[in-house]
């Protein structure tokens, strides 16, 4: 009997060409599907909550797969986890409703971006693969004032990179929190969903404002104009991490919340 299994995953994105399966390159989806195929002897399609880009990390990516394996989910999790590479970890596995879809059913996501704001880069902390090194001083108050402009329901077309298949560009951002942690600036962006490179383009804009190149009001101007050319550069992938994906209580109740 076919069952739907929900997987919560963490991975270091450095060695992957993103989440989505692609021919000839290493991807998280492709590698996991190969593990599942080797276990059950037949192709298994894995669906993910977020198509993280090459170099982007995850602490709480959610995926699901329909499979015919009849073994208990605890043993299933152990069998999968034992076959994963060192840069991928299966954090949790649970039974899901037959119609559960990680992307369609998601109601919220949190991404965290790490900026190393110091003259010396993050290499001494062995964190060069996990942060964007910005050596220029950044004014956190200016960045916070600008970040407030992102909160709410807006058309984020001005913060979407080309290449997205999505037609609708309206999204809701619930929170943008910035804080210093040692030499790092950590930026948490929480919302109902995000466009292609939206978070990285938001961060690139905040850094330009923090450097004093633009006023905080620039964010509102970009949102109103919907022009990507007015926004800042796309922040490097290595600073971004998908922290978690949330679902409605009814969905979590069907298979246990994490």
Image (cartoon, rainbow, N blue to C red):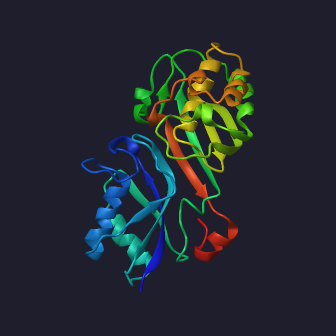
How many marks overall?
0
Quadrant for the N terminus in the image: bottom left
Q: Residue at x 52, y 24 (%)?
A: 233
Q: Residue at x 29, y 49 (%)?
A: 26
Q: Indicate the quadrant where residue 138 lies.
A: top right
Q: Residue at x 51, y 73 (%)?
A: 94
Q: Is residue 182 visible?
A: no
From the viewer's perspective, tell me whether residue 226 is left or right of residue 31: right
Quadrant for the C terminus in the image: bottom right
State the residue in front, 115 or 220. 220
Q: Indicate the quadrant where residue 71 lies.
A: bottom left
State the residue in front, 91 or 50. 50
| Vertical comparison of 70 with 232: above or below | below
Q: Is residue 239 visible?
A: yes
| Vertical comparison of 239 with 117: above or below | below
Q: Residue at x 46, y 39 (%)?
A: 163
Q: Point out residue 155 in the picture as x, y percentages from the top left corner.
A: 68, 38
Q: Point out residue 133 in the picture as x, y percentages from the top left corner.
A: 48, 24
Q: Point out residue 236 in the picture as x, y percentages from the top left corner.
A: 46, 31
> Farthest bottom residue?
1
From the viewer's perspective, tell me whether residue 55 is left or right of residue 95: left
Q: Point out residue 159 in the picture as x, y percentages from the top left corner.
A: 59, 33
| Vertical comparison of 39 with 223: above or below | below
| Vertical comparison of 148 with 63: above or below | above
């Amino acid at each position: 009997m076919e069952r739907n299994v929900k997987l919560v995953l963490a991975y270091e994105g450095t060695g992957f060409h993103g989440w989505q399966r692609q021919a000839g390159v290493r991807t998280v989806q492709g590698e996991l599907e190969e593990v599942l195929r080797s276990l059950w002897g037949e192709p298994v399609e894995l669906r993910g909550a977020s198509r993280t880009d090459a170099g982007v990390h995850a602490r709480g990516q959610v995926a699901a797969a329909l499979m015919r394996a009849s073994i208990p989910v605890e043993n299933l999790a152990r069998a999968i986890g034992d076959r994963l590479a060192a840069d991928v970890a299966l954090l949790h596995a649970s039974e899901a409703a037959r119609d559960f879809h990680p992307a369609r059913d998601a109601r919220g996501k949190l991404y965290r971006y790490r900026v190393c704001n110091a003259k010396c880069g993050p290499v001494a902390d062995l964190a060069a693969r996990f942060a964007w090194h910005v050596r220029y001083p950044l004014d956190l108050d200016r960045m916070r004032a600008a970040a407030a402009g992102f909160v709410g329901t807006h058309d984020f077309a001005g913060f979407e990179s080309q290449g997205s298949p999505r037609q609708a560009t309206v999204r809701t951002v619930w929170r943008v929190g910035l804080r210093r942690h040692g030499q790092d600036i950590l930026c948490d962006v929480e919302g109902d969903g995000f466009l292609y490179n939206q978070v990285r383009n938001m961060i690139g804009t905040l850094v330009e404002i923090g450097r004093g190149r633009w006023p905080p009001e620039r964010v509102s101007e970009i949102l109103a104009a919907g022009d990507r050319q007015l926004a800042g550069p796309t922040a490097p992938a290595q600073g971004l991490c998908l922290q978690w994906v949330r679902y409605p209580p009814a969905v979590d109740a069907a298979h246990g919340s994490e």
